[in-house]
Image (spheres, rainbow, N blue to C red):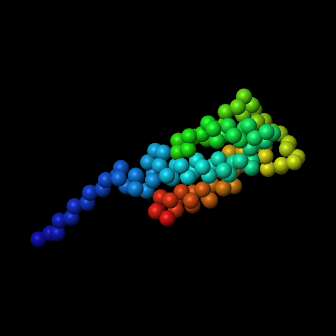
Amino acid sequence: MPNMFQFICDIPAVIKKRGLEDNGKVQQFIDSECLRLCEPKVPKRENILIESGHLNTVIGSGQIKYRTPYARRWYYMPANFHEAPERGNYWFDRMKQQYKNQILEGAKKIASGG
């Protein structure tokens, strides 16, 4: 007589348990880390551009938004910040290149319940 085995997998429950749902704890971690790690790379005169990232980003949405009249120009146009050479254009891309493994490890740890 063959053994009967029934496997039921509730995918939405698994996704939620791991914090992988929309606006879940994994996405919140990723968004928060991206903002935090971008901060030293964002051009800074009076913190307005940095603050706009915090004010216009909904943590957990998966979108980091810097909204000032000059944000686009500062992102794409090269500039020299002699007092802070890490600051400059393409700050998100440079942050991602430097810290992507660290962010992914943190997300993995959260998703695995650690």
> Residue 70 is drawn in which quadrant?
top right
> Residue 68 is drawn in which quadrant?
top right
Q: Is residue 105 left or right of residue 51?
A: left
Q: In the displayed structure, would residue 41 be above or below residue 110?
A: above
Residue at the spot x=65%, y=47% of the render?
A: 35
Return the residue nearer the eye: 9 or 114. 114
Query: Would you say residue 76 is visible in this rendering?
Result: no
Residue at the spot x=46%, y=62% of the render?
A: 112
Percent across and percent down for residue 7 are: 25, 60
Q: Is residue 28 left or right of residue 43?
A: left
In this view, the residue farthest toward the bottom is: 1
Residue at the spot x=49%, y=52% of the render?
A: 25
Q: In the displayed structure, would residue 56 be above or below residue 104?
A: above
Q: Is residue 73 left or right of residue 114?
A: right
Percent across and percent down for residue 105 are: 57, 61
Percent across and percent down for residue 87 are: 79, 46
